[in-house]
Image (cartoon, helix red, strand yellow):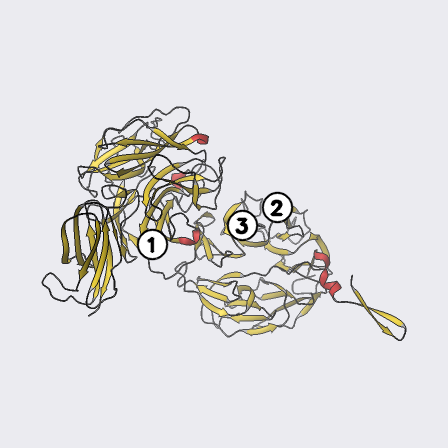
């Protein structure tokens, strides 16, 4: 308690300082920094505040469809809330940095917006509800900690004068009982938790009563049977909840909902089950859900990485869509693939961006199917042999329920004269390896280096002693005895190897977990100078899920395009399998997400750039330099292949599991032409690593030849080619984009050139 005194004559007069009251409220109430609502036509809108204090606005262009670009709508905000009123118009409440409360309202349903209008000039905390007749009710505390209530006056939608509900209040939340009576919950002096309700619907308010200990953040929702349920974070940051024993009736004892939390958001699933989202003290986002309407709560799990605020709303199809801001101001969204089921995963909210690639629909017939009835192909790789024939090595196992309990102790092997051959020829297994004591044989990956073929694959014993093994061959037929390169008890599997020019080393990427007993799925990597001795493991990507075995960071595949590195991983969207729903029946099993980074050793979820509908895909080029994507998996009937087209303006060598004949140290390095654009002449520089035949060709964007600049054998070294914008007949070409393609025995690369006449 703080006192001052002054003297009137010789008598001191003590004055109680207002800071006494302020001290009773520890910290500022949690203000929502993101809010979402659904238009009358079903389109979602979202408002969110970044750390620059600007409130931004985005909206769906069609129900359940793409999103608009980010648009600033208020330049000094610190809190925002939104909902529909009785006339189906969205109302957005904004608290600015000067604690003024503004209203931004749609002029008509699913239409434009009026200018903001000020409602109050001293607002500290806020909540509102839409009552049973659609009227919006606003509850807020001012800077003097007075709790007020205002509501819409129908039919003109003006707002009532403010009604004082409590003298001391901090955080606030409101709900409506089944009988229509409003009830408000708030933290009072020293954050003591109070509540008060109306004596009758629309009537006077009863006296306040202590509710349950302390509270500094509160959320209220209603069960499908009409019982209110209150979620609150106490002074010790423990998230608790309390619920009515019957509609409009008394309250059960509080129960701990989560150990530590910073904010809470509650939303309903399509069937009425509540879903609670909250962040822990490390800002990690979690969620828990009712396993049945008006019932108990299922297990909780991590929902995403860091979040400083979130909101959720049902789409027109009944699927929840969640939005949250991370600590770096990236706006993420996550959505249900089916109402109440299967979240898609953490994705940055992008819109109207230029796609970086397209993938054609997979054909109905596989290029290869094992001769065993009801067997499938899973993780696999492609490689060209010394005779130019293509080879495929992959896991072949019996389908579930096929009646054959034997797990294959070998890899499948098939060959073809060209990559896109309609039917590949099955070959004898490359080798047999007995499976004993829980040993696994998984995910072969073959590269060629100095005329030797290297096969990396997962071997070893139990989960605790997973190992990456290596065999070598001169002809892809006869293979050496295996050697164990390293053991990794973090469930290491699915290796792929590429040469990284950034560090002049071989890089092995593989899937694992960050804890031996099961933790976050990760893409791990190791480096090597000789493909035999490998460095200690590092982490390139970490997913927010946690568990053991099967996970959403499998089959890692890396492609380099210019200065960027693309990471392909799946299955995504991801759900852990259950007895009733095994992995191959989950929506994300046939899915791979794509991430782009300018680093070869680090990707985050915010680097997401696309999705491919395929399980364990390989990204590769054929003998003509055309790009393809493969697909396989349990109960998928074999191995499939389809065309892929890059739209990133580049056509540089791929660094992945399969590159023409092999993956090995590149045979040449190509630079972008200069100047570019040009109108008289341009130069193309490249360096050959080895003596060999070189073909340099200019084509238009349809692939038609314009001019051949070089077609002969050349020794290793640096070369500079010149093109003057003329075709083979020495006539100037039209203005436009042209491709300069260089091909050696092993690789193809190209750059786009812009010619302006």
1 vs 2, front mark:
1
The crowd level at tag 1 (other Cα within 10 Å; few <14, some 14-19, many 20+) is few
Q: Are the two marked residues, 2 and 3, in contact with CB atoms closer than 8 angstroms?
A: no
Estimate the spatial distance between the alpha carbons at disc 1 and disc 2, rounded to whole Å.
Answer: 44 Å
1 vs 3, front mark:
1
Q: Position of residue 585 (x, y in %)?
A: 39, 40
Relative to the observer, which residue lies in front, 156 or 240?
240
Count up the numbered dots.
3
Quadrant holding the C terminus: bottom left
Question: Helix, strand or loop at disc 2?
Answer: loop
Question: Helix, strand or loop at disc 1?
Answer: loop
When asked about the image quadrant of residue 118, the answer is: bottom right
| Residue at which label 1 appears | 563
Estimate the spatial distance between the alpha carbons at disc 2 and disc 3, rounded to whole Å.
Answer: 13 Å
Q: Position of residue 539 (x, y in %)?
A: 44, 43
The crowd level at tag 3 (other Cα within 10 Å; few <14, some 14-19, many 20+) is some
Left or right: 475, with 154 as reference point = left
| Residue at which label 2 appears | 259
2 vs 3, front mark:
3
Instruction: Please say if 138 is above or below 475.
Output: below
Estimate the spatial distance between the alpha carbons at disc 1 and disc 3, rounded to whole Å.
Answer: 32 Å
The crowd level at tag 2 (other Cα within 10 Å; few <14, some 14-19, many 20+) is few
Whichever of callouts 2 and 3 sits on the residue coming sooner in the sequence is 2
Left or right: 748, with 60 as reference point = left
Badge number at residue 284: 3
Relative to the observer, which residue lies in front, 423 or 755?
755
Whichever of callouts 1 and 3 sits on the residue coming sooner in the sequence is 3
Q: Position of residue 237 (x, y in %)?
A: 64, 51
């Amino acid at each position: 308690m703080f006192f001052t005194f002054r003297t009137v004559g010789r008598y001191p007069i003590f004055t109680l300082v207002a800071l006494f009251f302020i001290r009773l409220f520890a910290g500022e109430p949690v203000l929502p920094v993101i809010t979402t609502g659904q238009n009358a036509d079903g389109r979602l809108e979202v408002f969110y505040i970044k750390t620059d204090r600007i409130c931004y606005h985005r909206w769906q262009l069609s129900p359940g469809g793409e999103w608009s670009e980010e648009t600033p709508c208020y330049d000094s905000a610190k809190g925002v809330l939104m909902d529909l009123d009785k006339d189906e118009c969205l109302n957005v409440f904004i608290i600015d940095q000067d604690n003024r409360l503004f209203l931004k309202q749609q002029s008509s349903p699913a239409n434009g917006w009026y200018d903001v209008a000020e409602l109050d000039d001293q607002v500290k905390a806020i909540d509102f509800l839409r009552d049973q007749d659609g009227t919006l009710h606003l509850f807020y505390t001012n800077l003097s900690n007075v709790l007020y209530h205002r509501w819409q006056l129908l039919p003109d939608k003006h707002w009532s004068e403010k009604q004082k509900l409590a003298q001391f209040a901090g955080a606030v939340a409101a709900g409506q009982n089944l009988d229509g009576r409003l009830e408000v919950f708030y933290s009072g002096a020293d954050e003591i938790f109070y509540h008060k309700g109306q004596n009758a619907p629309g009537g006077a308010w009863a006296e306040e009563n202590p509710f349950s200990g302390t509270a500094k953040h509160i959320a209220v929702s209603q069960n499908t049977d009409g019982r209110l349920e209150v979620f609150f974070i106490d002074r010790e940051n423990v998230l608790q909840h309390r619920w009515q024993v019957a509609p409009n009736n008394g309250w059960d004892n509080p129960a701990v909902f989560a150990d530590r939390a910073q904010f809470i958001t509650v939303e309903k699933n399509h069937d009425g089950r509540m879903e609670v989202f909250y962040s822990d003290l490390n800002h990690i986002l979690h969620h828990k859900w009712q396993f049945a309407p008006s019932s108990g709560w299922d297990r909780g799990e991590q929902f995403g990485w860091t979040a400083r605020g979130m909101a959720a709303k049902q789409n027109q199809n009944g699927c929840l869509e969640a939005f949250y801001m991370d600590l770096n101001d990236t706006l993420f969204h996550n959505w249900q693939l089916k109402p109440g089921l299967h979240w898609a995963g953490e994705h940055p909210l992008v819109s109207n961006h230029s796609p970086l690639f397209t993938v054609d629909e997979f054909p109905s017939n596989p290029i290869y199917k094992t001769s065993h009835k009801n067997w499938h192909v899973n993780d696999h790789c492609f490689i060209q042999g010394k005779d130019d024939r293509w080879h495929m090595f992959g896991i072949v196992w019996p389908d579930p329920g096929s009646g054959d309990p034997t797990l294959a102790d070998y890899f499948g092997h098939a060959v073809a004269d060209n990559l896109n051959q309609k039917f590949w020829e099955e070959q004898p297994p490359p080798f047999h390896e007995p499976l004993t004591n829980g040993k696994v044989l998984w995910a072969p990956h073959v590269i060629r280096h100095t005329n030797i073929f290297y096969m990396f694959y997962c071997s070893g014993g139990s989960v605790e002693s997973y190992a990456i093994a290596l065999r070598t061959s001169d002809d892809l037929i006869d293979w050496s005895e295996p050697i164990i390169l390293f053991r990794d008890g973090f469930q290491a599997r699915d290796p792929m190897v590429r040469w990284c020019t950034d560090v002049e080393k071989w890089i092995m990427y593989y899937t694992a977990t960050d804890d031996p007993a099961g933790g976050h799925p990760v893409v791990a990597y190791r480096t090597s100078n000789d493909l035999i001795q490998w460095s200690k493991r590092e982490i390139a990507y970490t997913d927010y899920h946690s568990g053991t075995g099967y996970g959403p960071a499998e089959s890692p595949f890396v492609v380099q395009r210019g200065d960027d590195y693309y990471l392909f991983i799946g299955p995504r969207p991801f759900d852990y399998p259950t007895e009733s729903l095994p992995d191959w029946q989950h929506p994300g099993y046939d899915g791979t997400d794509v991430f782009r980074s300018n680093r070869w050793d680090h990707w985050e979820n915010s680097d997401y750039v696309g999705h491919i509908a395929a399980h364990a895909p390989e990204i590769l080029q054929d003998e003509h330099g055309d790009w393809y994507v493969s697909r396989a998996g349990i109960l998928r009937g074999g191995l499939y292949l389809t065309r892929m087209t890059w739209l990133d303006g580049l056509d540089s060598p791929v660094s992945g599991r399969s590159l023409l004949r092999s993956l090995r140290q590149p045979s040449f390095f190509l630079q972008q032409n200069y100047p570019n654009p040009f109108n008289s002449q341009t130069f193309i520089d490249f360096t050959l690593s080895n003596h060999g035949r070189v073909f340099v060709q200019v084509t238009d964007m349809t692939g038609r030849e314009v001019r051949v600049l070089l077609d002969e054998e050349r020794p290793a070294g640096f070369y500079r080619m010149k093109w003057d914008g003329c075709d083979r007949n020495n006539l100037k070409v039209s203005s436009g984009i042209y491709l300069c393609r260089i091909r050696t025995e092993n690789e193809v690369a190209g750059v786009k050139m812009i010619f302006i006449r």
